[in-house]
Amino acid sequence: MNKRLEKIVSILDDKKAENIEVIDLTSKEYIVDYVVIATTLNSKHGFSLLNHLKTALKPLGEEFLRVDDDDNWTIIDLGDIFIHLMSEKYREKYTIEEFLSELDSKK
């Protein structure tokens, strides 16, 4: 796992995100190389995690290209990494891990 992913996972873990998973998609047909998924405790926790990520990563040169957030799901686009911060209910409902595991491999 590269240093950027390690830093993201470390921040999320330190701030009590749950069930953190890193999915390597470098061999798949997808728009990013990696997806990080973490479960939030509630909407305020999700907002707090986003702020902690910005505070820690921006000084390291990380560019937040786009952020879409609401009370249940925040998606952070770092270019080659997506970070999904999801409520437990949404994580169970949308099963992103399952969707990503079914992607076709690059030819």
Image (cartoon, rainbow, N blue to C red):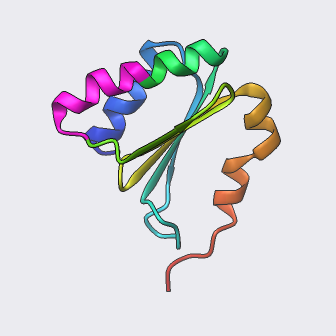
In magenta stretch: residue 53: yes
Question: At 45% across and 25% down in the image, what residue appears?
Answer: 50
Residue placed most toward the observer, 54 or 103: 54
- Left or right of residue 17: residue 88: right
Residue 96, percent across and down? 68, 49
Residue 59, percent across and down? 17, 28
Query: Considering only vertical position in the picture, is 16 above or below 5?
Result: above
Q: Which residues are magenta?
A: 51-62
The N terminus: image quadrant: top left
Q: Quadrant of residue 60?
A: top left
Residue 23, percent across and down? 52, 50
Question: At 52% across and 20% down in the image, what residue appears?
Answer: 47
Name the main secondary structure of what is drawn in magenta.
helix
Question: At 17% across and 38% down in the image, what residue appears?
Answer: 61
Q: Residue furthest bottom?
A: 107
Count how many numbered circles sit on residues in the image.
Answer: 0
Q: Quadrant of residue 69?
A: top right
- Left or right of residue 32: residue 6: left
Query: Considering only vertical position in the picture, is 45 above or below 53?
Result: above
Question: At 43% across and 64% down in the image, what residue appears?
Answer: 26
Query: Considering only vertical position in the picture, is 96 above or below 104?
Result: above
Residue placed most toward the observer, 25 or 58: 58
In magenta stretch: residue 56: yes
Residue 76, percent across and down? 46, 41
